[in-house]
Image (tube, rainbow, N blue to C red):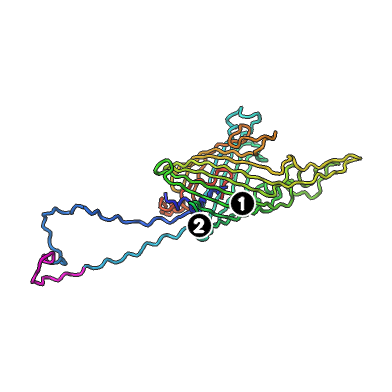
């Protein structure tokens, strides 16, 4: 596989999209065809002693050596071959790298009944839509949105068989930074809109972000055809909210009251919103023929808003201290881990099987939890498919092939999904 086809766009996630990497700018120009030269020792098409009729433009026998007094027939000049115009490389398609990732995920506790004390059977279908648009060789737009459908009556949704939309993000990547030590850097600025019910409940307006992506490739990994890709991501974001705490879904035409109680306004008590978010992630992916195993780890640090503990005058002489936070920590740390195996069915379709788990790094008792496996967390196994839309369009048009075509690899991770 051409190195340019793998890493022009690799470079997130996290991602990552991984994404990306998420890793994501792609070289879609196929290599120019080369005509092989004739073998120097090729056998003649006729027997050596076979009599060949002289050609009209053949030189006289004396022309091969010695002196000739006769002029003989003049040798005709061989016509010069017309110069072939160099083949023009096809113009890169602006939407190269656009992918749709489809996934069916199952909570392991759905089939392992004694995994934990509280069973919450969950089976979901999700679609990750990851468009890309190349402005020029240095600038590229990348988008991301998700659609999720929950088939079971899981606690992750409000109603049975609910369709949920994730947030919608747009990033502008700059890919013109020169590589150093074999590492290709890319930077991006982005905006995320609150199209998910969770973000709207947090009263989010918009979230700007700054992302740095680094990618490095190694050839001949373990085997002659083996390849190793390493992608690293770092991101900083600062969400803007209407309020610093979550709100009640839906507006009421009146002020909510509780008959002398507290915390019955339009805003909810409990965990505050995050004022600043730092996240970093790494993706390691290998390729051996049509198979590509990979792993992704992400950690995010959310710095939340804090509140003064004001004393509130209650009924009579009673006083209360407002407890706006459900935990004393001002930094919440969460992790996400996933590994998967890709199989390249065609140049536009890749089948995938994998596992992922996300969690808060601290348990309820304040101790650190296992970020990879935990029977009391939402561990998922899944089957997925990566569809490269641009390659699919080429296949429909009768083009396609492996020369300069982006393989539909997963470089974004199944759940978080880098751009």
Front residue of this view, candidates 95 and 252: 95
Magenta stretch, main secondary structure, is loop
Question: SS class of the residue under badge 2?
Answer: loop
Residue 197 locus on image (x, y percent): 67, 46
For residue 38, above or below residue 269 = below
List the residue tagged with mark 1: 168
Residue farthest to the right, as pictured: 316
Please indicate whether residue 32 sits to the left or right of residue 210 in the image.
left
Q: Which mark is residue 368?
A: none
Corner quadrant of residue 290: top left
Residue drawn at (70%, 33%) of the image: 365
Front residue of this view, candidates 80 and 408: 80
- One can see residue 293 in this view: yes
C-alpha gap between disc 2 and disc 1: 30 Å
Question: SS class of the residue under badge 1?
Answer: strand
Dot 1 crowding, Cα within 10 Å, few <14, some 14–19, many 20+: some
For residue 102, above or below residue 121 = below
Residue 355 locus on image (x, y percent): 55, 38
- Magenta span of residues: 60-77
How many marks the image carries: the answer is 2
List the residue tagged with mark 2: 178
Check residue 154 for magenta coloring.
no
Front residue of this view, candidates 134 and 229: 229
For residue 354, above or below residue 207 = above
Residue 53 locus on image (x, y percent): 12, 61
Corner quadrant of residue 300: top right
Front residue of this view, candidates 61 and 258: 61
């Amino acid at each position: 596989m051409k190195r340019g086809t793998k890493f022009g766009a690799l470079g997130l996630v996290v991602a990552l999209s991984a994404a990306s990497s998420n890793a994501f700018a792609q070289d879609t120009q196929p290599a120019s065809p080369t005509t092989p030269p004739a073998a120097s020792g090729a056998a003649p098409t006729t027997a050596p002693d076979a009599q060949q009729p002289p050609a009209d433009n053949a030189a006289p026998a004396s022309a091969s050596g010695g002196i000739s007094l006769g002029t003989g027939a003049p040798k005709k000049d061989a016509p010069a071959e017309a110069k072939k115009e160099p083949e023009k490389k096809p113009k890169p398609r602006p939407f190269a790298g656009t992918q749709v990732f489809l996934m069916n995920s199952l909570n392991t506790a759905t089939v392992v009944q004694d995994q934990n004390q509280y069973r919450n059977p969950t089976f979901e279908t999700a679609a990750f839509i990851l468009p890309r648009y190349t402005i020029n060789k240095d600038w590229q737009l990348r988008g991301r949105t998700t659609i999720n459908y929950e088939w079971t009556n899981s606690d992750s949704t409000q109603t049975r068989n609910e369709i949920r939309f994730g947030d919608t993000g747009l990033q502008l990547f700059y890919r013109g930074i020169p590589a150093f030590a074999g590492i290709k850097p890319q930077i991006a600025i982005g905006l995320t809109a609150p199209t998910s019910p969770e973000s709207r409940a947090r009263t989010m307006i918009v979230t700007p972000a700054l992302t740095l992506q680094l990618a490095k490739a190694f050839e001949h990994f373990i085997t002659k055809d083996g390849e190793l890709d390493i992608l690293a991501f770092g991101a900083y974001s600062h969400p803007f909210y209407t309020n610093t705490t979550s709100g009640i879904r839906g507006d009421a035409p009146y002020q909510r009251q509780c008959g002398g109680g507290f915390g019955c306004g339009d805003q909810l008590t409990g965990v505050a919103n995050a004022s600043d978010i730092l996240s970093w992630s790494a993706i390691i992916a290998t390729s051996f023929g049509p198979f590509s195993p990979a792993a992704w780890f992400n950690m995010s640090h959310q710095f939340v808003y804090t509140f003064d503990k004001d004393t509130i005058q209650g009924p009579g002489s009673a006083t209360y201290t407002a407890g706006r936070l459900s935990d004393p920590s001002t930094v919440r740390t969460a992790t996400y881990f996933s590994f998967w195996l890709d199989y390249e069915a065609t140049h536009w379709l890749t089948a995938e099987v994998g596992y992922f788990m996300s969690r808060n790094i601290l348990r309820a008792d304040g101790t650190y939890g296992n970020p990879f496996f935990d029977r009391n967390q939402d561990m998922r196994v899944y089957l997925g498919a990566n569809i490269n839309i641009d390659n699919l369009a080429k296949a429909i048009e009768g083009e396609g092939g492996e020369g300069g075509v982006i393989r539909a690899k997963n470089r974004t991770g199944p759940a978080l999904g880098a751009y």
